[in-house]
Image (cartoon, rainbow, N blue to C red):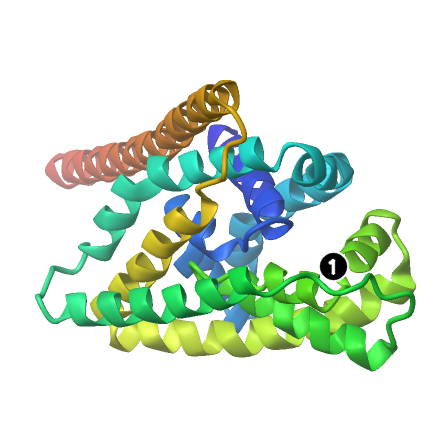
Protein backbone atom coordinates (compact mmCIF):
# COMPACT_ATOMS: atom_id res chain seq x y z
CA UNK A 1 0.00 0.00 0.00
CA UNK A 2 2.85 2.39 0.84
CA UNK A 3 4.46 1.60 -2.51
CA UNK A 4 1.15 2.22 -4.31
CA UNK A 5 0.66 5.58 -2.58
CA UNK A 6 4.25 6.67 -3.29
CA UNK A 7 3.89 5.81 -6.99
CA UNK A 8 0.55 7.64 -7.14
CA UNK A 9 2.18 10.75 -5.68
CA UNK A 10 4.98 10.43 -8.21
CA UNK A 11 2.38 10.13 -10.96
CA UNK A 12 0.77 13.35 -9.74
CA UNK A 13 4.14 15.12 -9.91
CA UNK A 14 4.71 13.73 -13.40
CA UNK A 15 1.25 14.93 -14.42
CA UNK A 16 1.94 18.48 -13.24
CA UNK A 17 5.40 18.56 -14.81
CA UNK A 18 4.02 17.22 -18.11
CA UNK A 19 1.67 20.20 -18.20
CA UNK A 20 4.49 22.67 -17.64
CA UNK A 21 8.06 21.68 -18.42
CA UNK A 22 8.17 18.10 -19.67
CA UNK A 23 7.98 15.00 -17.53
CA UNK A 24 11.20 13.21 -18.50
CA UNK A 25 13.55 14.88 -16.03
CA UNK A 26 11.12 14.51 -13.15
CA UNK A 27 10.51 10.84 -13.98
CA UNK A 28 14.25 10.16 -13.71
CA UNK A 29 14.56 12.09 -10.46
CA UNK A 30 11.66 10.08 -9.05
CA UNK A 31 13.31 6.83 -10.15
CA UNK A 32 10.63 5.61 -12.57
CA UNK A 33 11.87 6.79 -15.97
CA UNK A 34 13.77 3.80 -17.36
CA UNK A 35 11.15 1.27 -16.22
CA UNK A 36 8.34 3.36 -17.71
CA UNK A 37 10.22 3.62 -21.01
CA UNK A 38 10.62 -0.17 -21.08
CA UNK A 39 6.91 -0.64 -20.42
CA UNK A 40 5.92 1.87 -23.11
CA UNK A 41 8.29 0.24 -25.62
CA UNK A 42 7.03 -3.30 -24.82
CA UNK A 43 3.65 -2.94 -23.07
CA UNK A 44 2.57 -6.59 -23.53
CA UNK A 45 5.83 -8.16 -22.36
CA UNK A 46 5.29 -9.21 -18.71
CA UNK A 47 1.92 -7.49 -18.98
CA UNK A 48 0.71 -8.29 -15.45
CA UNK A 49 3.81 -6.97 -13.67
CA UNK A 50 3.96 -3.97 -16.02
CA UNK A 51 0.35 -3.10 -15.25
CA UNK A 52 0.94 -3.44 -11.52
CA UNK A 53 3.91 -1.09 -11.74
CA UNK A 54 2.48 1.60 -14.01
CA UNK A 55 -1.19 1.67 -12.88
CA UNK A 56 -0.68 3.89 -9.78
CA UNK A 57 1.51 6.23 -11.84
CA UNK A 58 -1.21 6.57 -14.48
CA UNK A 59 -3.80 7.14 -11.74
CA UNK A 60 -1.61 9.90 -10.28
CA UNK A 61 -1.24 11.56 -13.69
CA UNK A 62 -5.00 11.42 -14.19
CA UNK A 63 -5.59 12.97 -10.76
CA UNK A 64 -3.19 15.80 -11.63
CA UNK A 65 -4.88 16.59 -14.93
CA UNK A 66 -8.38 16.56 -13.42
CA UNK A 67 -7.63 18.41 -10.17
CA UNK A 68 -4.66 20.61 -10.99
CA UNK A 69 -5.01 21.28 -14.73
CA UNK A 70 -6.78 24.62 -14.55
CA UNK A 71 -4.88 25.50 -11.38
CA UNK A 72 -1.55 24.99 -13.22
CA UNK A 73 -2.66 27.29 -16.03
CA UNK A 74 -3.78 29.86 -13.45
CA UNK A 75 -0.44 29.67 -11.60
CA UNK A 76 1.54 29.99 -14.82
CA UNK A 77 -0.52 33.03 -15.79
CA UNK A 78 -0.46 34.76 -12.37
CA UNK A 79 2.38 33.24 -10.29
CA UNK A 80 4.88 32.01 -12.85
CA UNK A 81 7.92 32.90 -10.70
CA UNK A 82 6.66 30.88 -7.72
CA UNK A 83 5.72 27.95 -9.93
CA UNK A 84 9.16 27.90 -11.55
CA UNK A 85 10.71 27.88 -8.06
CA UNK A 86 8.71 24.79 -7.11
CA UNK A 87 9.86 22.98 -10.25
CA UNK A 88 13.43 24.11 -9.59
CA UNK A 89 13.27 22.73 -6.05
CA UNK A 90 11.94 19.40 -7.31
CA UNK A 91 14.89 18.98 -9.67
CA UNK A 92 17.49 20.00 -7.06
CA UNK A 93 15.95 17.69 -4.46
CA UNK A 94 16.20 14.79 -6.89
CA UNK A 95 19.81 15.34 -7.99
CA UNK A 96 21.25 12.82 -5.45
CA UNK A 97 18.96 10.14 -6.88
CA UNK A 98 19.86 11.11 -10.46
CA UNK A 99 23.60 10.78 -9.76
CA UNK A 100 23.10 7.51 -7.90
CA UNK A 101 21.16 6.01 -10.80
CA UNK A 102 23.69 7.25 -13.37
CA UNK A 103 26.57 5.59 -11.51
CA UNK A 104 24.75 2.35 -10.79
CA UNK A 105 26.84 0.44 -13.34
CA UNK A 106 30.06 2.35 -12.67
CA UNK A 107 31.57 5.63 -13.86
CA UNK A 108 33.94 6.39 -16.74
CA UNK A 109 35.41 9.76 -17.64
CA UNK A 110 34.17 9.45 -21.23
CA UNK A 111 30.59 9.73 -19.89
CA UNK A 112 31.30 13.42 -19.26
CA UNK A 113 31.62 13.95 -23.03
CA UNK A 114 27.97 13.04 -23.60
CA UNK A 115 26.97 15.25 -20.67
CA UNK A 116 28.82 18.26 -22.13
CA UNK A 117 27.38 17.70 -25.62
CA UNK A 118 23.84 17.46 -24.19
CA UNK A 119 24.48 20.56 -22.07
CA UNK A 120 25.64 22.65 -25.04
CA UNK A 121 22.84 21.36 -27.29
CA UNK A 122 20.14 22.19 -24.73
CA UNK A 123 21.60 25.63 -24.00
CA UNK A 124 21.36 26.47 -27.70
CA UNK A 125 17.73 25.30 -27.88
CA UNK A 126 16.83 27.12 -24.65
CA UNK A 127 18.35 30.39 -25.86
CA UNK A 128 16.41 30.04 -29.10
CA UNK A 129 13.16 29.39 -27.20
CA UNK A 130 13.75 32.42 -24.98
CA UNK A 131 14.40 34.77 -27.90
CA UNK A 132 11.16 34.07 -29.73
CA UNK A 133 7.82 35.57 -28.80
CA UNK A 134 4.57 33.69 -28.57
CA UNK A 135 2.36 34.05 -31.62
CA UNK A 136 -1.30 34.99 -31.65
CA UNK A 137 -3.66 32.44 -30.17
CA UNK A 138 -4.99 30.17 -32.92
CA UNK A 139 -8.75 30.21 -33.39
CA UNK A 140 -8.85 26.89 -35.27
CA UNK A 141 -6.52 23.87 -35.30
CA UNK A 142 -7.01 21.07 -37.85
CA UNK A 143 -6.90 17.38 -36.95
CA UNK A 144 -3.58 16.86 -38.76
CA UNK A 145 -2.08 19.85 -36.95
CA UNK A 146 -3.25 18.47 -33.60
CA UNK A 147 -1.51 15.14 -34.34
CA UNK A 148 1.71 17.01 -35.19
CA UNK A 149 1.46 19.16 -32.06
CA UNK A 150 0.86 16.03 -29.97
CA UNK A 151 4.07 14.52 -31.35
CA UNK A 152 6.00 17.73 -30.63
CA UNK A 153 4.67 17.88 -27.07
CA UNK A 154 5.41 14.18 -26.53
CA UNK A 155 9.06 14.66 -27.46
CA UNK A 156 9.46 17.19 -24.67
CA UNK A 157 7.65 14.90 -22.24
CA UNK A 158 9.69 11.73 -22.81
CA UNK A 159 13.11 13.29 -23.46
CA UNK A 160 14.63 14.26 -20.10
CA UNK A 161 15.72 17.87 -19.80
CA UNK A 162 13.92 18.87 -23.01
CA UNK A 163 10.86 21.07 -23.04
CA UNK A 164 8.78 21.72 -26.16
CA UNK A 165 6.04 23.69 -24.45
CA UNK A 166 7.73 26.91 -25.68
CA UNK A 167 7.27 25.72 -29.27
CA UNK A 168 3.51 25.25 -28.83
CA UNK A 169 3.33 28.62 -27.11
CA UNK A 170 5.21 30.27 -29.99
CA UNK A 171 2.82 28.69 -32.50
CA UNK A 172 -0.10 30.15 -30.55
CA UNK A 173 -1.78 26.80 -29.91
CA UNK A 174 -0.82 25.98 -26.31
CA UNK A 175 -3.72 27.75 -24.61
CA UNK A 176 -6.35 26.29 -26.95
CA UNK A 177 -4.97 22.74 -26.67
CA UNK A 178 -4.66 22.84 -22.88
CA UNK A 179 -8.11 24.38 -22.47
CA UNK A 180 -9.57 21.66 -24.71
CA UNK A 181 -7.89 18.89 -22.73
CA UNK A 182 -9.07 20.24 -19.37
CA UNK A 183 -12.59 20.71 -20.78
CA UNK A 184 -12.57 17.06 -22.04
CA UNK A 185 -13.00 18.17 -25.66
CA UNK A 186 -12.39 14.84 -27.43
CA UNK A 187 -12.12 16.63 -30.78
CA UNK A 188 -8.81 17.94 -29.42
CA UNK A 189 -7.87 15.12 -27.04
CA UNK A 190 -8.06 12.22 -29.55
CA UNK A 191 -5.87 13.58 -32.40
CA UNK A 192 -3.48 15.25 -29.96
CA UNK A 193 -3.26 11.97 -28.03
CA UNK A 194 -2.62 9.98 -31.24
CA UNK A 195 0.40 12.13 -32.08
CA UNK A 196 1.57 11.97 -28.48
CA UNK A 197 1.35 8.17 -28.27
CA UNK A 198 2.96 7.50 -31.67
CA UNK A 199 6.01 9.64 -30.84
CA UNK A 200 6.19 8.26 -27.28
CA UNK A 201 6.22 4.65 -28.51
CA UNK A 202 8.94 5.41 -31.06
CA UNK A 203 11.09 7.40 -28.65
CA UNK A 204 10.66 4.89 -25.82
CA UNK A 205 12.03 2.12 -28.02
CA UNK A 206 15.11 4.17 -28.94
CA UNK A 207 15.74 5.23 -25.33
CA UNK A 208 15.33 1.65 -24.08
CA UNK A 209 17.92 0.52 -26.64
CA UNK A 210 20.33 3.25 -25.50
CA UNK A 211 19.87 2.27 -21.85
CA UNK A 212 20.64 -1.35 -22.58
CA UNK A 213 23.70 -0.68 -24.75
CA UNK A 214 25.05 2.70 -23.60
CA UNK A 215 23.76 3.03 -20.04
CA UNK A 216 26.39 5.40 -18.62
CA UNK A 217 26.66 7.59 -21.72
CA UNK A 218 22.88 7.91 -21.95
CA UNK A 219 22.37 8.82 -18.30
CA UNK A 220 25.15 11.39 -18.27
CA UNK A 221 23.62 12.97 -21.37
CA UNK A 222 20.39 13.16 -19.37
CA UNK A 223 22.29 14.82 -16.51
CA UNK A 224 23.48 17.42 -19.04
CA UNK A 225 19.89 18.06 -20.11
CA UNK A 226 18.81 18.33 -16.46
CA UNK A 227 21.53 20.83 -15.52
CA UNK A 228 20.30 23.09 -18.31
CA UNK A 229 16.74 22.76 -17.07
CA UNK A 230 17.88 24.12 -13.70
CA UNK A 231 18.98 27.33 -15.40
CA UNK A 232 15.80 27.40 -17.48
CA UNK A 233 13.55 27.32 -14.39
CA UNK A 234 15.27 30.21 -12.57
CA UNK A 235 12.63 32.97 -12.65
CA UNK A 236 12.98 36.73 -13.03
CA UNK A 237 11.82 38.06 -9.65
CA UNK A 238 9.99 41.38 -9.61
CA UNK A 239 10.66 42.15 -5.93
CA UNK A 240 12.69 41.07 -2.90
CA UNK A 241 9.58 39.61 -1.25
CA UNK A 242 8.88 37.50 -4.32
CA UNK A 243 12.50 36.28 -4.31
CA UNK A 244 12.29 35.31 -0.62
CA UNK A 245 8.97 33.47 -0.98
CA UNK A 246 10.18 31.78 -4.17
CA UNK A 247 13.36 30.60 -2.44
CA UNK A 248 11.34 29.17 0.44
CA UNK A 249 9.06 27.33 -1.99
CA UNK A 250 12.09 25.91 -3.82
CA UNK A 251 13.64 24.67 -0.56
CA UNK A 252 10.40 23.12 0.70
CA UNK A 253 9.65 21.36 -2.59
CA UNK A 254 13.24 20.11 -2.77
CA UNK A 255 13.04 18.64 0.73
CA UNK A 256 9.70 16.97 -0.04
CA UNK A 257 11.04 15.33 -3.22
CA UNK A 258 14.20 14.21 -1.44
CA UNK A 259 12.18 12.43 1.25
CA UNK A 260 9.82 10.92 -1.34
CA UNK A 261 12.81 9.33 -3.10
CA UNK A 262 14.20 8.19 0.27
CA UNK A 263 10.82 6.68 1.13
CA UNK A 264 10.91 4.60 -2.04
CA UNK A 265 14.43 3.40 -1.14
CA UNK A 266 13.06 2.46 2.28
CA UNK A 267 10.15 0.47 0.84
CA UNK A 268 12.46 -1.23 -1.69
CA UNK A 269 14.97 -2.21 1.01
CA UNK A 270 12.16 -3.41 3.25
CA UNK A 271 10.79 -5.58 0.45
CA UNK A 272 14.26 -7.02 -0.25
CA UNK A 273 14.76 -7.82 3.45
CA UNK A 274 11.35 -9.47 3.57
CA UNK A 275 12.14 -11.60 0.51
CA UNK A 276 15.53 -12.54 1.95
CA UNK A 277 13.95 -13.56 5.25
CA UNK A 278 11.36 -15.68 3.43
CA UNK A 279 14.10 -17.41 1.42
CA UNK A 280 16.11 -18.11 4.57
CA UNK A 281 12.97 -19.37 6.30
CA UNK A 282 12.21 -21.71 3.40
CA UNK A 283 15.78 -23.01 3.41
CA UNK A 284 15.53 -23.72 7.14
CA UNK A 285 12.25 -25.56 6.64
CA UNK A 286 13.78 -27.64 3.84
CA UNK A 287 16.78 -28.48 6.03
CA UNK A 288 14.53 -29.50 8.90
CA UNK A 289 12.48 -31.78 6.65
CA UNK A 290 15.69 -33.26 5.23
CA UNK A 291 17.15 -33.90 8.67
CA UNK A 292 13.95 -35.54 9.85
CA UNK A 293 14.05 -37.89 6.87
> Residue 124 location in percent, x, y?
40, 69
In the picture, measured across the screen, residue 293 lies left or right of residue 269, that is left
Left or right, residue 27 beside residue 80: left
Task: Kindly tell me whether residue 38 is visible in this rendering.
Answer: no
Q: Give the residue furthest to the left.
A: 109
Res 171 quadrant in image: bottom right
Residue 140 visible somewhere in the drawing = yes
Q: Which residue lies at the image location 9% right of the left edge and 65% below the top edge? A: 108
Q: How many marks?
A: 1
Task: Write the residue at 50% across / 32% down.
Answer: 237
* Picture coordinates of residue 102, whole percent (x, y): 24, 56
Quadrant including the C terminus: top left
Relative to 221, 158 lies left or right: right
- 115 w.r.t. 198: above or below: above
42 left or right, relative to 104: right
Mark 1: give few (<14), some (14-19) or many (20+) Cα within 10 Å: many
Residue at 61% over, 67% down: 154
**Residue 176 image point, x, y percent:** 83, 58
Q: Where 274 sits versus 126, above or below? A: above
63 and 75: which one is in front? 75
Rendering coords of residue 223 (x, y %): 30, 57
Q: Residue at x 70, y 69 (%)?
A: 150
The residue at which mark 1 appears reads as 174
User: Dividing the picture into quarters, in which one does residue 273 lie?
Assistant: top left
Given residues 224 and 277, the one toward you in this image is 224
Name which quarter of the figure residue 74 lies in: top right
Looking at the rendered structure, the secondary structure element under dot 1 is helix
Q: Nearer the viewer, residue 288 or 152?
A: 152
Q: Is residue 210 above or below residue 190?
A: below
Amino acid sequence: MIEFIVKTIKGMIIGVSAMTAGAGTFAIILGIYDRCMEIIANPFKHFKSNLKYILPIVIGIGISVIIFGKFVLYCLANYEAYFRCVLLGIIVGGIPTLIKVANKKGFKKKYLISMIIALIFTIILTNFANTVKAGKTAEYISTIELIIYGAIYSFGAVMPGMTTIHILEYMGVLEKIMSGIFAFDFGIIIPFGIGYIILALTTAGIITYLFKNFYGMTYYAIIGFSITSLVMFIPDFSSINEAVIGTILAIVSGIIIYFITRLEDYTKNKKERFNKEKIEENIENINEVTNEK
